[in-house]
Amino acid sequence: MQDNLYNLAFERSILSSIVFEPQQFDELSVALKKDDFYLPAHQDIYTAMTTLLQKDQPIDEEFIKKELIKIKKFDEQVMIEILSANPISNTKAYVDEIKDKSLKRKLLTLTTEIKRVTVEEELPSAEVVDIVEKKLYEITQDNQTSDFKDSPQMTFDTMEYIKEMKARGNSVLVGVDTGFHELNKMTTGFGKGDLVIIAARPAMGKTSFVLNTVNSLIMQGKGVAFFSLEMPAEQLMLRLLSIQTSIPLQKLRVGDMNDDQWSSLNGAIDKMNSAKLFVDDQGSININQLRSKLRKLKNQHPEIEIAVIDYLQIMSGIGNQDRHIQVSEISRGLKMLARELEMPVVALSQLNRGLESRNDKRPMLSDIRESGSIEQDADIILFVYRDDVYLYKEEKEREKAAKNEGKEFVSEYIEKEEEDAEIIIGKQRNGPTGHVKLVFQKKLTRFVEAQPKAIETTYEHIDTRSANIDMGESSIAMPTL
């Protein structure tokens, strides 16, 4: 049993190799940590070596001894055993073995921790699961090591990417389809590993917008994971069915449909029965739980190409930290998860109320709630904006004021079935910022392409004389870094 948890001979050989060939330590110090060694005396020696490296002092017998004596940790017998061990040339195999046993010890410690919090502290099962998932994630992260990619490797990977793009012909789509042609042209789709933020004030239609993307993907046979923290899964399904059938959402809710509509609904239901859509509507979830659920789902269904969270500010924090710190951990966790699973993670976000006091109520990056970390972690930030929402609100306020003053009120507001909408690209790490025009069909809670095609972009000092870019008729802003 103990042989599976440590190998002192391997540990001695690694330490001996460092003493006799100190130049190896630069590389080994990246892969190994103090806790990877089982014997406390070996941990002390490795720590002393690290201290000497930081001080730019020789990593040899005398200096190691001097450093250990200083902290009263010198063990002459252990040092003799290390100096007597044979140095090795293939250190990688030894390092892998030491790290493997270190991981097993950490997992064994975790089982003890599970027993403690479950039996002795009698914590609720949900809290125990949360603690275990967090500890397990920390263990796996600590055990991962990665080396630099050298220039030949990066060049090869880049050429393979360019060849893949060439094979696609003139397709503007590189990442996951957004569901809108003009937005695809601006973004080339949502890329693998991207954290995409879709932000808006309430009632602007951010959930409706992302459901248009979801519907487009599932109709193409793509897999989608949807974490709905605000809306039950059945309501999401009603909206998707309305988008697909063009039956008003209210008619679907009450079952008020004619024969043709019932037939159309049954056809849509048949399609949705084979759709690769997975919805979690638990309503309360933290980043550790979301990470665990999405990893498991992705392993079971590799066809999943995108994950959606509706919405970020409803996610629970971990511990009793300040909310800004919790949101920072959530946004960073979502970005790391997107990179780990190599798929875009789309998170919806609320905007601060302050923007409504401006004359121009179009959102900007500083309007995102707890915006610092979200703005930093996101690769793409899209704002959903409909001017008619504010026109309607202002009309209602005028009506209320007139009634309070006892005056007759004649409404000048004409409610439209289709409203102009804008998708504002506030940030794009690898592309332009700008505006894409859409139309919002209110009864269907559906966004559609504006006709004719319309696209506006901002211009931020591009010198087209030195850039090999076909600008066409639209101006392009430089990528936001």
Image (cartoon, rainbow, N blue to C red):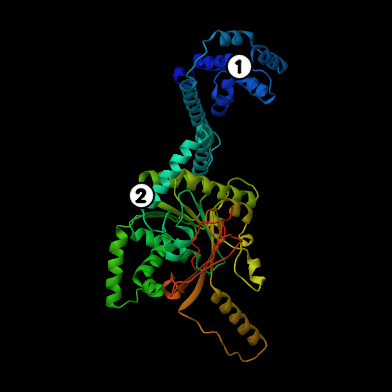
> Does the rendering let one see residue 73?
no
Residue name at image x 42 percent, y 46 percent = 161
User: In front: 442, or 340?
Assistant: 340
User: In front: 207, or 335?
Assistant: 335
- Give residue 252's quadrant in the image: bottom left
Extreme-right residue of the structure: 70
Residue 48: percent from left, percent from top: 65, 20
User: Looking at the image, is 42 positioned above or below residue 169?
Assistant: above
Residue 140: percent from left, percent from top: 49, 35
- Give residue 226's quadrant in the image: bottom left
Which disc, if any, is residue 93? none
Q: What's the distance in space between the residues labelled 2 and 1, CA to CA?
A: 49 Å
Q: Nearer the viewer, mark 2 or mark 1?
A: 2
User: Looking at the image, is 371 positioned above or below residue 252?
Assistant: above
User: In front: 104, or 422?
Assistant: 422
Left/right of residue 376 with respect to residue 298 in the rendered view: right
> Does the rendering let one see residue 63?
yes
Label 2: which residue? Answer: 303
Residue name at image x 45 percent, y 57 percent = 188
User: Looking at the image, is 149 positioned above or below residue 280?
Assistant: above
Extreme-bottom residue of the structure: 408
Residue name at image x 55 percent, y 26 percent = 27
Report the amino acid beneath label 2.
Glu
Which disc, if any, is residue 41? 1
**Disc with the residue nearer the chain's start (2 vs 1):** 1
- Crowd rating for badge 1 (residues with CA inside 10 Å; few <14, some 14–19, many 20+): some
User: In front: 63, or 118?
Assistant: 63
Report the amino acid beneath label 1.
Ala
Residue 341: percent from left, percent from top: 44, 45
SS class, disc 2:
loop
Left/right of residue 179 with respect to residue 116 in the rendered view: left
Left/right of residue 338 with respect to residue 374 in the rendered view: left
